[in-house]
Amino acid sequence: MQKRLLLAAIGGIGMAVGGGGAAHAVPSYATAQLHFENFILGGIVDASGNPLPGVTDLTTSVTTTTAAAYPTAPTSDSHSAPGDLANGSDAAQSLAGPIAATPPAENTFTQVLTPPTTLTPAGTRGDVQITGAIASGATSNLIAEGKLSVANSAASSNAGSSTTISFSFTTTAALIVSLNFDASSFLFGQVGSLGDSANPQISAIYTIVDNTDPNNPVEVASAAPTALNQNRSTLNPLVNASFSSPLTHYSFSDSLLANHTYQVTLSDNTTEILSTRPIATPEPASLALLGAGLIATGLLRHRGKSRV
C-alpha cells in the first residue's frame, strides 16, 4: 500500500510539470478585413484626376501601406506604395514568421492561416490594394491576419494595412463634395489559452478640414460609419472576438464655401494584435516541497489505517 501511495504522489508531480509544457499548444488567431466597391468621390476631380471647375491649386496623394511582425522574425516587414486617382495603389504584401516561407499570392483578401488548426504555418501578414478611378468607381481591399504559436512564453505579433487618400485645394466658387461607396467588414479573433489575447480592429474615416487660416484649421465635416469602425478582443478560448457587416451603401454630401482652402482626407485601416502570456512552471524547490507534502500525506493516511 505504501508503495502505491508513493507512486501516486510522484505521478501527481509529473502531471504538474507536464501540464506547463502543453501551454499554447493551440495557436491564437485574428483577422481584420475591409472591402469597398463603387467608390466615387465627386465635386473635386474628374475620372482622370483633373480638377473640376471651381477647384484650383489642387494637390493629391494616394498611398497604401502594409506591415507585419512576428516574434521569431529578426525584423518586421513593411511596404508602402504611392498611387494616383485614375489607377489607385497596390503596396506589396507584408509577411513575418513561418508563413513567409510559403506565402499566399499577392492580393489575397481571404483567410489563409485558418484558425485554430496547427496544420497551416503561423505568422502574420498585411495586404492592401486600390484599383480603378477614385472619382468614377474604385474598388479597395484591406486585410490583416495573424496566427501566433509559441512555446510557453510571453510573445506578441501584429499586422496591418492602410489606405490614405488626400486632396488639398482652393475653391473659386461654392461647390458640393460627395462621397458614395458600398462596403463590408469582417473581424475574428480566437485565443488558444486563457489569458492570451486576440484583438482585430478596423477603421474608416472621412474628414474635411478648412485650412483657410493655417493657424486655425477647422474641421467642417467628418464621417466614421459604425460598422466600419470596430475593435474586438478576447482573452478566453471559449469566447471568440467577432464582428461582420454585409455589403452596405454609404453616401455623404457636404457644401464648401468659395475662396476657401480645404483638405479632404479618406483613411482606412485594418489591424490585428496577438499576445501570449507565459504559464508559470514550478521551481525545483517548489516541486520538492510538493512531493514531500504528497508523500507525507500518503504515509499519514497509511498509518491511520494501520491503527484501525
Image (cartoon, grey):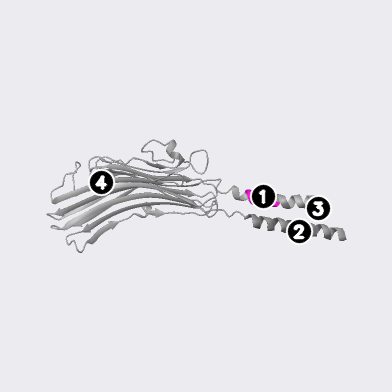
The main secondary structure of the magenta stretch is helix
Q: Amino acid at mark 4?
A: Val
Give the numbered dot on residue 46: none
- Marks 2 and 3 sit apart, C-alpha to C-alpha, by 11 Å
Image quadrant in which the C terminus is located: bottom right
Q: Nearer the viewer, residue 103 or 131?
A: 103
For marks 2 and 3, the one nearer the N-term is 3
- Marks 4 and 1 sit apart, C-alpha to C-alpha, by 57 Å
Q: Amino acid at mark 1?
A: Met
Q: Is residue 13 magenta?
A: yes
| Residue corresponding to mark 1 | 15
Where residue 133 sits, quadrant-wise, is top left
CB within 8 Å, label 4 to label 1 = no
| Residue corresponding to mark 3 | 2
Q: Nearer the viewer, residue 273 or 241?
A: 273
| Residue corresponding to mark 2 | 296
For marks 4 and 1, the one nearer the N-term is 1
For marks 1 and 2, the one nearer the N-term is 1
- Front position among marks 4 and 2: 2
Where residue 209 sits, quadrant-wise, is bottom left
Give the numbered dot on residue 62: 4
- Marks 4 and 2 sit apart, C-alpha to C-alpha, by 73 Å
| Neighbourhood count class around disc 4 (C-alpha, 10 Å): few under 14, some 14–19, many 20 upward | many
Q: Residue 16 location, x and y as percent?
A: 65, 52
Q: Amino acid at mark 3?
A: Gln
Q: Is residue 171 left or right of residue 228?
A: left
For marks 4 and 3, the one nearer the N-term is 3
For marks 1 and 3, the one nearer the N-term is 3
- Marks 1 and 2 sit apart, C-alpha to C-alpha, by 19 Å
Where residue 223 sits, quadrant-wise, is bottom left
Q: Residue 148 location, x and y as percent?
A: 48, 46
